[in-house]
Amino acid sequence: MEIGDYWAPQRIDNPELKSDLSKYFFTEKDSKQIDELLSKHKHQLTVICDRFEFIQKLMNFKKILIKYRKYEKPKSEEIILDGKKAFAITRIEHIDFEGFEFNGLTYDIDALAQYLQLTLIDTIMGSADYLHIVPWLKKQSSNKTFSIEELDAFHDKYIENNGLRKNFIKAFTIISDDLQKKISDTFLIAKLANNGIEQESYNYWIGLSERDKYLKIVRYLYDDIRCKYTHSSIRNFLSDTHIMGRQSTSFKVLISKVDPKKITLFDLLNEVIKELLISRYDKIV
């Protein structure tokens, strides 16, 4: 066959794969040990390492863009809040870099980086056996008809125990107790009130056991951050803005109890990824 005007995807290899694995994950392994890992699991480690490095570079690019961020003079508007007069302050940002406009891109980077971290956890955990809901239902009951209430209950059980979600939650139960506690101590999930946290949802959170709090945080990461980005393109941003000045929400959000200058969800997910990868491959060599 003659070569015509055709184009195909490039093949891109990472010439620094070995050093990247050492830098990001296997700091205590020597060159020979990493070679042995690559001889057995090169494809998996390449995918994971390249994705992890890309995430870090995204956040580094965000730092560059922030240096070029400028704000217009804040605009104030009188509004009614909880039956009282208040002022809403709006800041409009501009980012011009190398002749291009990147307004708001730093927030998109936050949302994308978190999403990629969560999908990377899926990758490290490996594929789970997926069973469609119809054959799954047949295993649960011999009935051929179900009430709406029964289907609703079955659906919750199906989501809880099937496929990627089950594997994802398992990942957060096998990381170290110290890291689990760090995650649990950093966040709570509640609705926002004007300039604060909605009291009823806060009281509900306080009444939960520490284990239930932790599992709700993990499920939030999967259901409200990972899946909503995948299926609905809904972005979730880092909890790095003080709630003073935030308006109320009709839905629950992930609220940080720790100053974001000390630690963020991005930092914690990096720790989770590193722990999971090391624990999976540490016994191989």
Image: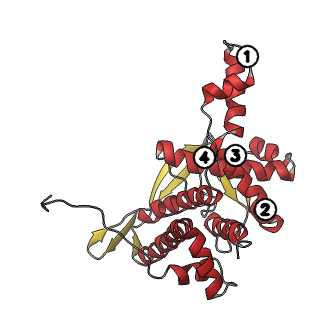
Q: Is residue 205 visible?
A: yes
Residue position for label 2: 180
* Label 1 – label 4 distance at C-alpha: 33 Å
Name above or below for residue 86 compared with residue 72: above
Kindly state the secondary structure of the residue where label 3 is placed: helix
Check if mark 3's residue and mark 2's residue have beta carbons within 8 Å.
no
* Label 2 – label 4 distance at C-alpha: 19 Å
Q: Which residue sits at x=81%, y=63%? A: 181
Which of the 4 quarters of the picture holds residue 165?
Answer: top right
Q: Residues within 10 Å of mark 3 (few under 14, many from 20)?
A: some
Which of the labelled discs sits on residue 142, or is there none? 1
Which of the labelled discs sits on residue 38, or is there none? none
Q: Position of residue 49 (x, y in %)?
A: 54, 71
Pick the front one: 57 or 236: 57
Pick the front one: 16 or 66: 16
Pick the front one: 201 or 158: 158
Q: Disc 3 or disc 4, which is closer to the eye?
A: 3
Kindly state the secondary structure of the residue where label 1 is placed: loop
Q: Amino acid at mark 1?
A: Ser
Kindly state the secondary structure of the residue where label 2 is placed: helix
Which of the labelled discs sits on residue 224, or is there none? 4
Q: Amino acid at mark 2?
A: Gln
Residue position for label 3: 166
Q: Earlier in the sequence, mark 3 or mark 1?
A: 1
Q: Earlier in the sequence, mark 1 or mark 4?
A: 1
Q: Which residue sits at x=61%, y=44%? A: 249
Q: Residues within 10 Å of mark 1 (few under 14, many from 20)?
A: few
Name above or below for residue 75 compared with residue 208: below
Name above or below for residue 60 compared with residue 109: below
